[in-house]
Amino acid sequence: MFFSDGAASQFKQKYLFVNLHLMQVQHKLERFAWHFFATSHGKGAVDGVGGTVKRLVWRRVLAEKVIVSDAASFFNCAVSANTGICVLFVSANDVELNRAALNERWSCVTGIPGTHSIHSVVAVNDTTVMHKPYSLSNTCTYFDMKLGEECHNSDGGVVVSPANDDAVQRFAPGQFVVVMLPGKGRTVQKFVCEIVTVDHDDNEMEVVYLKSQGETGRVFVGSNEKPFWVSLSQVMSCLPLPSVNRRGHYTFPCSVEPWKVQ
């Protein structure tokens, strides 16, 4: 979980949003969320550390002890100051090594309308994020940054297209989904489930369903039922990862009531 200010040039913009899932996979994180402080709030230790390094370098420049003309000379000056602060240098070659991959990833990315009012973003998959007006809000919106549109179906869930042969590749054990199962007569029941196994060849996944707790639509507990297999066509929504407490309660960041789960 990250916290930062909402500077559009650095953090609150489409390139960072679409990279959240990439960073989640690279660092093997169960959940990746980025929260933004309100305007003129959020100064913290990192700002003080950065200010200290810049001030020390500037003093040495004023004392005519060094000449700082580029990033490398700034880095060397900061390291020689022996501040105890770990300073890392990212060279132009390092940037170029990643430029092609990032440009390809960003080539079809669209911005989220009303980005300035967003204060919480959670990675859902490689193209979709869930965003909220503030971190504890029960109101959330899913947005596909490649399609440039909200990912909602008639029940308010995230769209998962069974016709897409690559769709199952987005799923992995430990993720949470809403699945549809046949009920009595012609009725359909919907359940929140955790993915146990994914069969990429047959476009199926083994899941175990969770039981709802309370009336908030956010808290669930594990069931004693055995895992069962469902096809991709039965998966109607992908959910953000919940937090789990010591009692085994799964709390999702927003209510799943729009999916009308059992």
Image (cartoon, grey):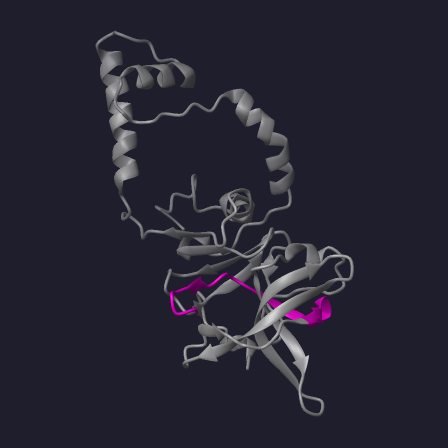
Stretch in magenta: 229-248
State the image coordinates of residue 159 (x, y, percent, origin top left). Answer: 64, 66
Q: Residue drawn at (37%, 47%), measured in percent from left and top?
A: 6
The answer to whether 76 appears left or right of 239 in the picture is left
Asked which quadrant contains residue 95, the reply is: top right
Residue 103 at x, y = what percent?
61, 36
Residue 130 drawn in magenta: no
Q: From where the camera sits, is residue 70 visible?
A: no
Q: Quadrant of the C terminus?
A: bottom right
Which of 223/145 is in front?
A: 223
Residue 43 lies, with reference to residue 64, above or below; the image says below
Where is residue 146 drawn, in percent x and y? 63, 51
Where 113 sits versus 181, above or below?
above
Q: Is residue 164 something that shows in the picture?
A: yes
Using the image, determine if residue 174 lies above or below residue 59.
Answer: below
Quarter of the image for residue 208 reads bottom right
Residue 237 forms part of the magenta stretch: yes
Q: Nearer the viewer, residue 69 or 181?
A: 181
Q: How many marks?
A: 0
Could you say where residue 45 lies in the image, as x and y percent from the top left?
26, 39
- Identified at 78% across, 62% down, the residue is 202
Residue 30 located left or right of residue 137? right
Residue at image x 31%, y 53%?
38
